[in-house]
Amino acid sequence: MSENVRVLIVEDDQRIADINRRFVEKVEGFEVVGIAANGAEAKEHIAILEPHLLLLDVYLPDMLGVELVQFVRLYHREVDIIMITAAKEAETLRAALRGGVFDYIIKPISFERFHERMEAYRKQWDRLRQADTLEQEEIDRLLARGREPAPRNVHFLPKGIDRVTLDKVRDAMRAASGEGVSAESVAQLIGTSRTTARRYLEYLLEEGEAYADLVYGTVGRPERRYILRNHEK
């Protein structure tokens, strides 16, 4: 099994740091090992936690992010950096590029954009760790860093949600009557556990593809049923 990329988030805004953490946790093959609120904390965390990758803001309370880039290049050359920042100044970008950052992403950032860049990083990270030599064509691809624009209709799924299973759940919901489906009925139809079926149904609910209703029987507790939008019978 491939090793997870260990990520240190360096961000003084706790709200944004939490968003970045949740984004990382949704991408397969990455794990957050720490969060630093300033440059001094970041230096300590790098030495102790040994991250592979920094997600770094430019504006920190005690220093500029590009100064931390220079520190990392001097003392922790094995650590990679992706800058996630509101800074749009060309000089800041030039300093970051001179420091060898992998990417420079302007806030606010969507999960789709974040996922695309992390996947590009992971592809390069894996290949450079596995290969002894590389041909020019592959070097060109790696240095391009996957910057071909993603199709507009691509939607990245979070951990625990498989596209094939999700399509089976949708099909089961389309075939249901106007009263919708329960987690138990979907589990029986597609051959999964009730817990798994509920997870997929709740995902469709969160995404706005479905809504839920309570159906009251003659006895017992009301049953939660899920109905696909625009597919009511």
Image (cartoon, rainbow, N blue to C red):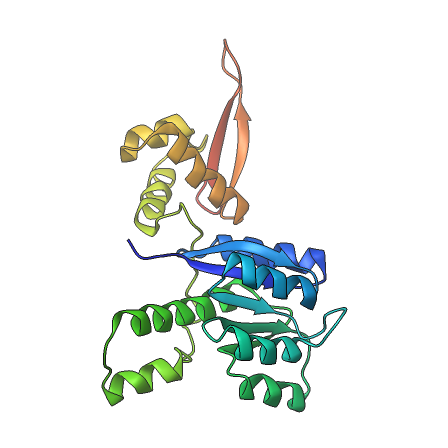
Residue placed most toward the observer, 21 or 175: 21
Q: Residue at x 63, y 54 (%)?
A: 18
Q: Viewed as shown, does residue 49 lie left or right of 173?
A: right
Q: How many marks?
A: 0
Q: Residue at x 39, y 56 (%)?
A: 4
Q: Nearer the viewer, residue 93 or 148?
A: 93
Residue 83, above or below 24: below
**The quadrant where residue 12 appears:** bottom right
Q: In this view of the protein, which residue sits in the foreground, 147 or 5? A: 5
Report the residue at 55% width, 79% height from top.
74
Residue 10 appears anywhere in the view? no
Residue 136 location (% of width, % of height)? 26, 89
Give percent across and percent down for residue 20: 59, 59
Asked if residue 195 shows in the view, the reply is yes
Q: Residue at x 67, y 75 (%)?
A: 58
- Name the image quarter holding the C terminus: top left
User: Residue most toward the right?
Assistant: 61
Residue 24, position as x, y percentages in the image: 51, 57
Look at the picture and state if 177 lies above or below 144: above
In front of the other: 134 or 206:
134
Horizontal placement of 29 versus 221: left or right? left
Q: Is residue 166 above or below residue 41?
A: above
**Residue 130 horizontal/vertical position (percent):** 26, 69
Q: Which residue extends farthest top?
A: 219
